[in-house]
Image: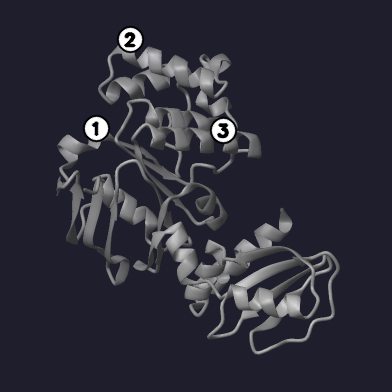
Amino acid sequence: MYLLETRNLKKYYATQKAVDDISFGIEPGKIFGLLGPNGAGKTTLLRMITGIFYPDEGQILFEGKPFDPQNDIGRIGYMPEERGLYKKMKIGEQALYLAQLRGLSKSEAMEGIKEWFVKLEMESWWNKKVEDLSKGMSQKLQFVTTVLHRPKLIILDEPFSGLDPVNSNVIKEEIHELARRGATIIFSTHRMEQVEEICDQIVLVNRGKKILDGTVKEVKQQFKKHLFRVGFEALPALQETPVFSVADASKDGTLTVKINDGYGPNAVLQSLMQQGAVIHSFNEVLPSLNDIFIQLVESTPASRQFLNREASMANGR
């Protein structure tokens, strides 16, 4: 049984279809990636799942029953991309207040806060105010207040925003640990490489529509192009055969070959060895989620602008 299931969800604003007939299901204990560019409909979808918005059409099921915000919201932890912290309030007092608001007793809240503050090296922050925190520090605090009441469903919208690589890694490890303990996690982002590292299953949305759904492994297999990277002791002078063509030759002694229709990896190996090649590695090249995203949506002008911006950011890193 799914912990969370959406059935044909729709949400319209005037003439804009923010969410247009989206369905998916998430099993307990899974890390689920909700992907898409800015403006794809991800935030609207999350706000319907958390009861902030009501769908115009469709249904949300929580543990097999129609979602009831009044009763089910206490079992959800939601970390929005926009900061939801009180700037003038001390960090310790704020964490305590939000935990009690979620139904924990003062003693339960204090115990949980101390445990998380130690884990994330936040012990010295207790009397600091939120307005004195960096973006990354406030992100860590918001993560703690999201998971403190041990929700069954944890929704993280751009959780690594503002975090340095070390703290990003710490939060990744904690996300995996929460899933191992049985929490179900929705991880929403437009950064494909982060989802590839973390998620079991993904849904890709663009302009309000679902355009891809499946496990990361299934999706990569679906879009593979029968490419293999071959490493040699010394790069030989090869002749292409009916079995394969050379897609790319690198300077590090490897070739990327494309297997032609009707042949398999063994036929490629046999053909290479018949030409005297000494092979020390042979690995399938699977597309990245970013490659797949580009393939699916690059024909849309708005999507091209997004992809160009992402490429510029990547080149600047």
* Secondary structure state at the residue bearing disc 3: helix
Residue located at (60% from left, 34% from top): 167
Dot 2 or dot 1, earlier in sequence:
1
Residue located at (34% from left, 41% from top): 29
Q: Which residue is mark 3?
A: 170
- Up-down relation of residue 287 to residue 90 (above or below): below
**Badge 2, how many Cα within 10 Å: few under 14, some, many 20+?**
few
Residue type at mark 3 is Val
Q: Which residue is mark 1?
A: 74
Residue type at mark 1 is Gly
Dot 3 or dot 2, earlier in sequence:
2
- Distance, label 3 to label 2, CA atoms, is 26 Å
**Badge 1, how many Cα within 10 Å: few under 14, some, many 20+?**
some
* Secondary structure state at the residue bearing disc 2: helix
Residue type at mark 2 is Ser
Q: Which residue is mark 2?
A: 107
- Up-down relation of residue 21 to residue 192 (above or below): below
- Distance, label 2 to label 1, CA atoms, is 19 Å
